[in-house]
Image (tube, coloured by chain):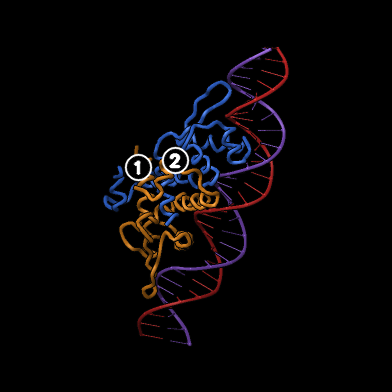
Chain colours: A orange, B blue, C purple, D red
Amino acid sequence: MHDAEHIRTGTKGMPKDEQLSDLADLFKMFADSTRVKIMFALMENELCVRDISSALNMTQSAISHQLKILKSANLVSNRREGKTIWYRLSDDHVKSIIAQGFDHILE
Amino acid sequence: MHDAEHIRTGTKGMPKDEQLSDLADLFKMFADSTRVKIMFALMENELCVRDISSALNMTQSAISHQLKILKSANLVSNRREGKTIWYRLSDDHVKSIIAQGFDHILE
DNA sequence: TGAACATATGAACAATCATTCATATGTTGC
DNA sequence: GCAACATATGAATGATTGTTCATATGTTCA
């Protein structure tokens, strides 16, 4: 099911400190409601910064800062098309992680 | 696969603001390496505070504070047995969420 | 080239948060 | 009751971080 099945099942011992730090850093990306909203918005369509700003009713600057953070974590990618820059989720793991989180919340 | 399948697949629209905040709050619990290490340690066995303190080489107080936070989020539970208090993961979602995170990291 | 638009970025500020230190609470056995 | 042990808790502090404001970069079109 998971590449990290041995982790879910608790076998093979504790990973290295650095890996657990990386894991915490990954979850940090999902630990802010603005970033979660951005990723959620990107689940359906590619969007430009202004689309997201108005969808979340937030400043262009705030969104831009967060997109940069998400990009540095390789969770979103972008492409330029003239003046506008289109953002998208980098891969399906984002969807999986969010869905898994919802599973816990919706119980 | 998931209770929140419609989320993973991106159908049914955007959840309420409060839900996305709750989601961010959940991931906040995994966004600190100390807490991740604690949860990891609890994957195999029930442990008491002192067990965890020495396993992570951290202060009893620091661990106790984090355990309180994890407990308030219903991610860990405990039971008293004389002087010692045993902690355990509340349910398997914790393992699933961590495993999912590792899937992304280990790519 | 210059104006208009879209996005990025740096500095500053307020808020959040993890750890430490000191101390309190709770439990056991004598 | 009292000492010894196990854990919890409150206040203080240093570090991290999200947003804002002002401004810079980059692109198009006339």
- Can the viewer see residue B21 in this picture? no
**Residue sitting nearer the eye, B82 or D27:** B82
Label 1 SS: helix
Which element is circle 2 on? loop
Q: Is residue B101 above or below residue B73?
A: below
Circle 1 packing at 10 Å, graded few (<14), some (14-19), many (20+), is: some
Residue at the image point whose x is 47% and y is 31% from the top: B77
Q: Is residue C3 above or below residue B81?
A: below
Q: Residue furthest front?
A: A12
Asked if the residue under mark 1 is in contact with the one under mark 2, i.e. CB atoms within 8 Å, the reply is: no
Q: Is residue B44 left or right of residue A51?
A: right
According to the picture, the residue beneath numbered tag 2 turns out to be A10
- A84 over B48 or under it: above or below: below
Q: Nearer the viewer, residue B106 or B2?
A: B106
Above or below C27: residue B14: below
Question: Which is in the foreground here, disc 2 or disc 1?
Answer: 2
Residue B45 x, y percent position in the rendering: 48, 34
The residue depicted at 58 percent of the width and 23 percent of the height is: B83
Residue displayed at 55% across by 43% down: B34
**Which numbered dot is residue A103?**
1
Q: Amino acid at mark 2?
A: Gly
Question: Image check: C26 left or right of A104?
Answer: right
Locate residue A89: give its quadrant. Answer: bottom left
